[in-house]
Amino acid sequence: MRVRGYLAGALALTGGALMLASGYSSRGFLYTALGYAEPRMAALLSGVYASAALLAITLLEGVIALGGVTVMAGGLGIVFRHTTAGKTLIWLGGGAGFLGLIVGFGYSAYRLGGLGPVLGYLPYWVGLALAIAGRRLAKRA
């Protein structure tokens, strides 16, 4: 059972390294949702609560924006038996999972004009797929 945890961590570390090496940064659904929520916090909350909520959103956006680094930290968390924290970091760094990968790939193909430019980011997509596979494998470990 522990071998599965090491394999999951190794997949996530490899995926995070590929994501970093590609130089492509994807803004996932959660990042976009937080961007929409941030300006509305001041209207819904007041004083210290609004400031705390805006700080939390800003910190979370920063963690999500780090992408590959966050995925690698999640892989290390899994290797060192902090499975829940590792899976959470992989989820934050890699988007919302396999559905996020498929939607992101389709959106990029549409936005960039076909599959040619998207295939230039193949290391990122492979890294993201490895990170997702590592997270799924860690669920069973």
Image (cartoon, rainbow, N blue to C red):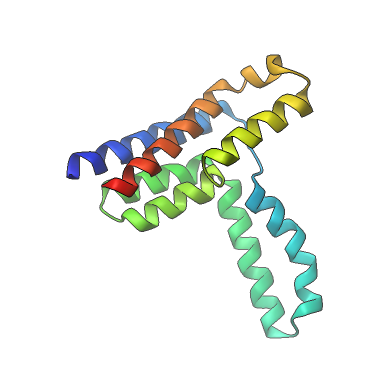
The image shows residue 12, relative to residue 64, as above or below, that is above
Residue drawn where x is 77% and y is 78% of the image: 44
Percent x, y of residue 128? 50, 34
Q: Is residue 65 left or right of residue 7?
A: right
- All told, the count of numbered labels is 0
- Please give the name of the residue rendered at 52% of the width and 32% of the height, measured from the top-left corner: 19
Q: Quadrant of residue 124?
A: top right
Residue at the farthest bottom position: 47
Q: Quadrant of the N terminus?
A: top left
User: Residue, x 64% and y 76% (percent of image)?
Assistant: 52
Task: Kindly identify the residue that appears in the image at 63 percent across and 56 percent down.
Answer: 61
Residue 125, horizontal then vertical, whole percent: 55, 28
Q: Using the image as rendered, state which of residue 117 and residue 115 is in the foreground.
A: 115
Q: Position of residue 37 (x, y in %)?
A: 74, 64
- Left or right, 100 with respect to 81, comes to right
Kindly indicate the quadrant of the structure image that contains residue 23.
Answer: top right
Give the left or right position of residue 32, taking residue 17 as reference: right
Residue 20 x %, y %:
52, 33
Q: Is residue 73 left or right of residue 23?
A: left
